[in-house]
């Protein structure tokens, strides 16, 4: 079977209010975890699917993201589309209409799937990633009958299942998706004043389109400091410890020190990640994310994020 050529759509326009003050100077997808920005983890999974074309829906603090992508991903065919107003995920995806033809893969810009995205597009069907959760009221919810998806609902007060949408979707024909989104937008329907992708999925079902569920074992919804630190710990457990420059320092694994970072006379770990361009001197850190470009001296910290603005 011939491999279909997918375009990835990654919405990254959100303000990340729950991650303030760390998102005061960058979009949340540019926050570091395990030594590199969230978006780098996402793009690694996208590229593993053989996808070369990526459309970013940008907005808040877009400059740092655009600079990072243009510097580190020159081999990709990238397009940046601006979302001027925060009108919701459905609106963000609809803005990609002019830039996307044929099959598309949507991955939310603050979601790291624990595993591969390949099974999502290997179905050769319209598909959504799902996971059973304890409290589905915070999510888009999938209703199944005999293993088939028969309904979608966004953040329902009384969920019909505990099967949640977790931020990755694949469509064989993006035009059908954009048409459904247009119907939702024209109807004026919103949830919490936002145009929802979930409502467009429900429209597709009413038009007879089959959408299959692809269950994953876990995902990291990097929307709070607590989850970001938890994700950092989990990913560090899977990485080989690396220390480019750690003069006179004690490194207690698992830790990650990016190439080009400088560490002198420090005690780091466990669970410390140091991103590129960071300089640490005489610091004692445990369970800490050190963001790119951070300079810290004589600092003792635990269970926090250090960046060049807030530390």
Image: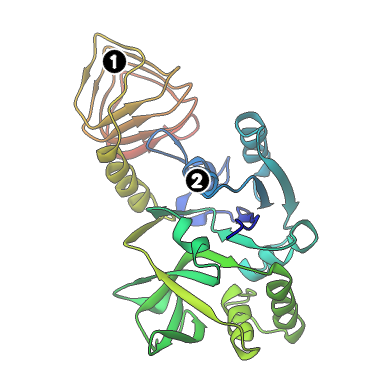
Name the N-terminal-most of marks 2 and 1.
2
Question: Which mark lies nearer to you, 2 or 1?
Answer: 2
Examine the rendering and report whether any part of residue 139 can be seen.
no
- Residue corresponding to mark 2: 48
Q: Residue at x 64, y 29 (%)?
A: 71
Residue 184 quadrant: bottom right
- For residue 218, above or below residue 242: below
Task: State which quarter of the image contains the N terminus.
Answer: bottom right
Separation of residues labelled 2 and 1 (CA atoms): 39 Å
Q: Is residue 224 left or right of residue 204?
A: left
Q: Which residue is mark 1?
A: 282
Residue drawn at x 70%, y 79% is: 180
Q: Secondary structure at mark 1?
A: loop
Seen at 32% across and 72% down, the residue is 133
Dots 2 and 1: beta carbons under 8 Å?
Answer: no
Q: Is residue 227 left or right of residue 55?
A: left
**Residue at 54% across, 53% down:** 109
Q: Is residue 101 visible?
A: yes
Residue 119 percent across, percent down from the top left? 45, 60
Q: Secondary structure at mark 2?
A: helix
Seen from the viewer's position, the closer of residues 289 and 218 is 218
Labelled disc at residue 147? none
User: Label 1 neighbourhood size at 10 Å, few (<14), some (14-19), many (20+)?
Assistant: some
| Mark 2 crowdedness (10 Å alpha carbons): few <14, some 14-19, many ≥20 | few
Q: Residue furthest top?
A: 248
Is 77 in front, or is 258?
Answer: 77
Quadrant the C terminus occupies? top left
Choose top left, top right, bottom left or bottom right for residue 251. Answer: top left
């Amino acid at each position: 079977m011939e491999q279909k050529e997918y375009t990835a759509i990654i919405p990254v326009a959100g303000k990340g209010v729950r991650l303030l003050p760390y998102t005061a100077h960058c979009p949340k997808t540019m926050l570091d975890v395990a030594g590199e920005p969230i978006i780098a983890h996402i793009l690694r999974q996208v590229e593993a699917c053989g996808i070369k074309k990526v459309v970013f829906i940008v907005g808040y603090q877009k400059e740092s993201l655009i600079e990072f992508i243009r510097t580190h991903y020159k081999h990709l065919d990238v397009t940046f589309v601006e979302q001027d107003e925060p009108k919701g995920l459905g609106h963000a995806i609809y803005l990609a209409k002019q830039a996307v033809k044929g099959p598309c893969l949507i991955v939310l810009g603050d979601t790291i799937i624990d595993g591969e995205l390949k099974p999502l597009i290997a179905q050769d069907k319209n598909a959504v990633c799902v996971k059973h959760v304890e409290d589905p009221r915070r999510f888009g919810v999938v209703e199944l009958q005999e293993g088939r998806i028969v309904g979608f609902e966004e953040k329902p007060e009384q969920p019909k299942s505990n099967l949640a949408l977790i931020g990755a979707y694949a469509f064989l024909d993006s035009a059908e998706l954009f048409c459904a989104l247009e119907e939702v937008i024209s109807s004026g329907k919103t949830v919490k004043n936002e145009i929802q992708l979930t409502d467009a999925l429900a429209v597709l079902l009413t038009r007879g389109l089959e959408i299959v569920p692809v269950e994953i074992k876990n995902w990291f919804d990097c929307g709070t400091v607590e989850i970001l630190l938890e994700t950092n710990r989990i990913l560090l457990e899977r990485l080989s410890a690396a220390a480019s420059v750690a003069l006179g320092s004690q490194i207690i694994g698992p830790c990650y020190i990016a190439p080009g970072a400088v560490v002198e006379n420090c005690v780091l770990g466990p669970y410390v990640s140091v991103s590129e361009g960071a300089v640490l001197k005489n610091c004692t850190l445990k369970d800490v994310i050190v963001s790119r470009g951070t300079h810290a001296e004589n600092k003792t910290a635990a269970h926090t994020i250090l960046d060049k603005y807030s530390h």
